[in-house]
Image: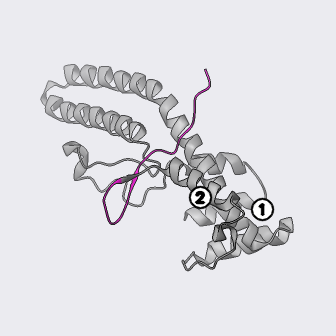
Amino acid sequence: MNKKKTLGTSHHDLFTGEPIDINELVLKLAQKLADPTSTGGSKKKMSYSISPLAQVLIKKVAQETGATQGSIVEAAPLLFAKMAMDSLERRSTALGTLKTLKDQISRSLSSFAKLAPHLKSYTDQVEKMMEEIMDMEKEAVASKNLQGVDTGNHPCLNGLKIGKGELPPYNKEIRDFLGGNELLAPLFQQYQE
């Protein structure tokens, strides 16, 4: 079975609030760029800020590969999309194993409470948190949340400060892709800090 990978509709139009289908947007842009009568294919300046480290990284990669800095920036969206889609696929595949692990934790918590019944209210709270963690990841994968998870609908997790400043899930795919590359791996490590 050939499964079509999609980026999903996790973004919304700033003015209308309507969901934006990233795949449709990319397809329209590609068609516009391929149209010889369109001015969409001409290069345009964009105004956005990137960190000094990213600027150094682009320059270093350009020097090492002989590519122009512009060609590196132009390839970045496709490479990012690939890493993000791979991350979502990994997370989706992992849901079954995560459920098995959560069930093992539940059994351990039950055994813990039997040995120390006075702590059962605490183990019950941990059990609720584990349920919500599992639900939170299932929801994130189902909604194609490429950036991580949302604690909003999960009262046990909502007040926690965990997750603020966490790296997005696709960082694992980037790290795995870079492997032990002597030039890029240390730069990526600095980029994460």
Q: Is residue 129 left or right of residue 58?
A: left
Q: Tell me the chief SS of the magenta region.
A: loop
- The picture places residue 154, in percent across and down from the top left corner, at 23, 43
View extreme (front): residue = 37
Residue type marked 1: Leu
User: Residue 141 lies in what quarter of the image?
Assistant: top left
Under circle 2, the secondary element is helix
The answer to whether 25 appears left or right of 75 in the picture is: left
- Considering the image in quadrants, where does the N terminus appear? top right
Q: Which residue is at a point 72% across and 48% down the rendered structure image?
A: 179
What is the magenta range?
1-18
Report crowding for label 2: few under 14, some 14 to 19, many 20 or more residues within 10 A (C-alpha).
some
Label 1 belongs to which residue? Answer: 183
Task: State how far apart marks 2 and 1 are (Cα).
Answer: 34 Å
Q: Amino acid at mark 2?
A: Leu
Q: Closer to the camera, 4 or 146?
A: 4
Pinpoint residue 76: horizontal percent, then vertical percent.
Answer: 66, 61
In the structure shown, which secondary structural element does the residue marked by tag 1 occupy?
loop
Residue 11 belongs to the span the image colors magenta = yes
Residue identifier under label 2: 29
**Residue 6, position in %: x, y?**
53, 41
**Residue drawn where x is 64% and y is 77% of the image:** 44
* Above-or-below relation of 30 to 125: below
Residue 33 falls within the magenta-colored stretch: no
**Residue situated in front as seen by the camera: 127 or 15:** 15
Q: Quadrant of residue 161?
A: bottom left
Q: Say few, some or many: other residues with alpha carbon within 10 Å of mark 1 (under 14 / 14 to 19 / 20 or more).
A: few
Q: Nearer the viewer, residue 190 or 153?
A: 153
